[in-house]
Image: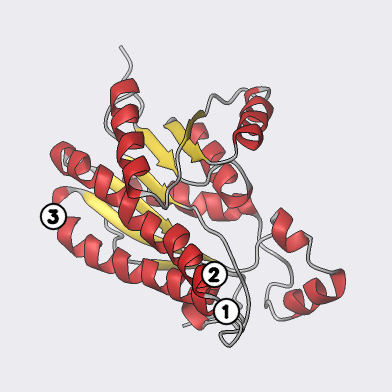
Amino acid sequence: MTDKPKIALVTGGTGGIGAAICLKLADSGFRVLTNYRNEAKAQAWKAEVGAKGYDIGIYQSDASDYGQCEALVKQIEQDYGVVEVLVNNAGITRDTTLRKMTLEQWNEVIHVNLDSVFNMSRQVVNGMLDKGWGRIVNISSINGQKGQLGQANYSASKRGMHGFTMALAQEVARKGITVNTVSPGYIATEMVMAVPEKIRDAIIADIPVGRLGTVEEVAGIVDFLTSDSAAFITGADIAVNGGQLMF
């Protein structure tokens, strides 16, 4: 008789870094689930990875809405059981200088990037405490560590994620639960590859390893942090940026 696979919930998992995390955790034996807002995109992605042998559960839910997060986790618990791994990956940008930034642009980024971390973590932490085991990984950004022109909203939201990480890590450390942050630098996602080549080359010139990162490299760090081997790592902010920012 085999052990039941642990349940991993990845927010924003149908594209880019989130999709790579979903597949990597599935390869490691987790039962992987993700949420989505765009039905057509999510169904197309599920079919695409399904053709490769992956069975990723998808649920329509907005991570920036507390009530929807509460309903999502209750449904997952009914369908599969307690969420033991949570990867808070959902994120958006609404870039502009502060003098031009609207309240809507500020609020939207804070709601999606930062409020979602509270919304989802709040729903799963009690189940993890009851089990005496859990992993929460928050996907931040190099721009949350150093700031970035035109991203006051984004940088604030991503910096706030790690403050949340450090506080929660201390609350649950003695209960077998770790909470960590992963801060990617410039990764070869569709969004980055859509940047004009001249600008992209300038970005790469500022990265000591001389290239963009891959989504698989970020997913590999998340996979390690969710394993038993990482049980002594908590409250950390792990940079995956090719040496672009060292501290």
Distance of label 3 from label 1 (alpha carbons): 42 Å
Residue with the mark numbered 1: 101
Distance of label 3 from label 2 (alpha carbons): 39 Å
Identity, as a three-letter code, of the amino acid under mark 3: Arg
Q: Is residue 131 left or right of residue 104?
A: left
Residue 174, numbered circle: 3
- Mark 3 near mark 2, Cβ–Cβ under 8 Å? no
The N terminus appears in which quarter of the rendering?
A: top left
In this view, 233 is above or below 58:
below
- Mark 1 near mark 2, Cβ–Cβ under 8 Å? yes
Q: Earlier in the sequence, mark 3 or mark 2?
A: 2
Residue in the picture at 42% in, 53% down = 64
Residue in the picture at 35% in, 60% down = 180
Residue in the picture at 52% in, 29% down = 56
Given residues 75 and 130, the one toward you in this image is 75
Residue 72, numbered circle: none
Query: Residue farthest to the front?
Result: 103
Residue with the mark numbered 2: 105
- Mark 3 near mark 1, Cβ–Cβ under 8 Å? no
